[in-house]
Amino acid sequence: MVAPILAIPCDVMADVAMTTVKRFGKLRLAIFPDHNPPHFHILGPDCSVSVDLRHFKTLDGRPLPANAAEILEWAKAHPELLWELWKELNG
């Protein structure tokens, strides 16, 4: 059973250590040691969105930008890696 979606805004702060997992052109998939629920960030010049690791939907319910489709496909193909990194950074 999937836990309920928590609509927590995620502000990416420059002083928080981040792990860039993979780059996709101008976008990158990153994980921060910031808060629950388990999630990753898709970051770029015109894109900053948090995606829940449990069901690959945005935390705030907004649709993903079209240019983030490749990142989402990659994330869905590598959930074990993303969960491992999230647990390592968030204890």
Image (cartoon, rainbow, N blue to C red):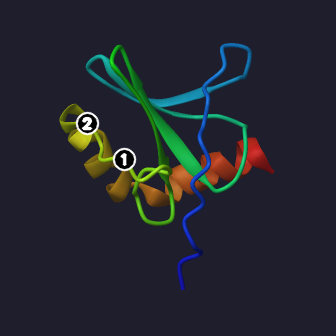
In terms of depth relative to the viewer, which is nearer, 84 or 52?
A: 52
Q: Position of residue 43 (x, y in %)?
A: 43, 26
Which corner quadrant of the image does residue 19 belong to?
top right
Tell me the SS state at disc 2.
loop
Find the residue positioned furthest to the right.
91
Give the number of the mark in front: 2 or 1: 1
Say which residue label 1 marks.
Answer: 62
In terms of depth relative to the viewer, which is nearer, 54 or 87?
A: 54
- From the viewer's perspective, tell me whether residue 40 is left or right of residue 63: right
Split into 4 quadrants, where in the image is the N terminus? bottom right
- From the viewer's perspective, tell me whether residue 31 is left or right of residue 41: right
Relative to 65, is 90 above or below?
A: below
Q: Residues within 10 Å of mark 1 (few under 14, many from 20)?
A: few
Q: Position of residue 64 (x, y in %)?
A: 30, 43
In terms of depth relative to the viewer, which is nearer, 52 or 82?
A: 52
In terms of depth relative to the viewer, which is nearer, 77 or 4?
A: 4
Which residue is found at the position 64% from the left and 56% from the top?
37
- From the viewer's perspective, tell me whether residue 73 is left or right of residue 79: left
Which residue is found at the position 50% from the left and 57% from the top?
53
Relative to 54, is 75 above or below?
A: above
Tell me the SS state at disc 1.
loop
Relative to 72, is 56 above or below?
A: below
Say which residue label 2 marks.
Answer: 65
- Three-letter amino acid code of the residue under disc 2: Pro
Q: Residues within 10 Å of mark 2 (few under 14, many from 20)?
A: few
How many marks the image carries: the answer is 2
- From the viewer's perspective, tell me whether residue 1 is left or right of residue 15: left
- Three-letter amino acid code of the residue under disc 1: Arg
